[in-house]
Amino acid sequence: MTYNPLIPIGEDPPADQVNQIRQNFASLASVFSKTILGSVYNHTPFNNFNQGDHESIIFQKQSTDPGVTLNLDVLYAKDAVSATSTEPQLFVQIPKFVPNNKPNNPMQLTFNTVNTTGPVYQSFLPGGYLFFFGTVSDISLPITLVPTPSSIVIAIAQSNNGFAASVVIANPDKVKIFSGNETMPYTFSWMAIAKA
Amino acid sequence: MAIPPEKTIVFNPATPQPKDIIEDSQESFLDNFQVLYDSFKKNHIPLDATSNAGNHTNLQLLQQPKDTDFQTDQGEISVYTKNVEGQTDQIFLRYQGNQDEFQYTNYQIYSISPKNRQTFFFTFLPGKIIVYFGVITPKGSTFDLEIKPRIAKNIIGVNLCPFNVSSNTGFPLYPPFINSCVETSPGIFGIVSLQTTFLSENIPPCSYIVFANV
């Protein structure tokens, strides 16, 4: 049995209604206490000090943008296509907009991978951008960005010795640093922003 | 035949009364179950769904009053929406124990067409920071790097890095100097004025990244 908002029926004897009413209460309690491997999902259960709060939030993937017409922001999950895969990502839409002649596009807030161990570190920026960064001492070979982005928008490098550094972008995933002498024992800090 | 007015369904937590038979309180039961069902269906997979009931389809965060000061106990993070002057409804976060709130989203991201030898991209970082980035291809010894959209109240930092050109087989080109950050309207910085270094005749093509407060 599932939740049924159309009960009880007045003519039915009370004994017949008890189970239906209990089922509705049980369905509510069950939905508010979804637990997997000991972790509570979505809402804090009834009869708990924090009842009604959210524990984790599971977003069911949507196929369209919900849109906003009132004074609210809306968070949701939707597939986003990147160069490496199509994955549900967290999006936000906000209602009002400056300047007014621009579309109220949804904004992709997340990407499904990060690299926190290097040497090519990777995180993400709102808008469907990947952010790569690190340090390198051997600049004879280009830096390969992983995961492979669609295209690199910018690359910036700086040497630790005060000499100038310049870059060449080889889309979709390579950045080469130049600094006059590739065998110099210097390190270079670098960063790149790319479209996912 | 006149159409009866649509009934307003109201949740009644005081139903049923002790001496009611079910028929007496049927309407209140129906109303209560319907209100619970309809309310929960907003933002959630419905209660009677065959799978995933209770998961979220989306999360609508209604604008809260500007001066609202949400309380967060230990073990709690609060996510909410407030209207920000000169911007839009934005998402805020407040961490456990009533720590200082911070603004997570900052602005509406949209695409801007290249113009005047410059490409324009922007994103945001939590804390009212906008990151502008792109490529400039100057033609001369000076260049006005434009900040779009023009909402920057303070330029925090500017970094530029030249692209190496194919005719230059070894030594790097030099990035330009930053002459000044120019207010294009009161309190809004819209231009970063660049000038070539003494080592270069003209400003080379460069990647740029600008961090700004909004």
Image: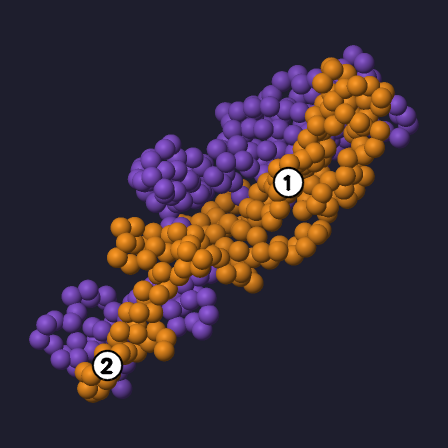
In this rendering, position of residue B157 left or right of residue B170? left
**Residue A98, position as x, y percentages in the image:** 51, 42
Q: What residue type is labelled 2?
A: Gln
Q: Please, which chain is the residue tagged with disc 1 on?
A: A
Task: Specify the chain shown as purple.
Answer: B
- Gap in angstroms between the C-alphas marked 1 and 2: 57 Å
The disc numbered 2 marks a residue on which chain?
A
In the rendered structure, the answer to whether residue B2 lies left or right of residue A117 reads left
Left or right, A117 with reference to A145: left
On residue B136, the disc is: none
For residue B7, above or below residue B118: below
Residue nearer the viewer, A184 or B139: A184
Image quarter in which the N terminus of chain A is found: bottom left
User: Which residue has dot 2 on it?
Assistant: A17
Chain A: give its colour. Answer: orange
Q: Which residue lies furthest to the front in this view?
A: A37
Number of numbered callouts drawn: 2
Answer whether residue B52 is visible to the viewer in this image.
Answer: yes
Instruction: Name the residue type under label 1.
Output: Asn
Q: Nearer the viewer, residue B88 or A109?
A: A109
| Residue located beneath label 1 in the image | A115
Secondary element under disc 2, as helix, strand or loop, is helix
- Counting from the top left corner in percent of width and height, residue A19 is at 26, 78
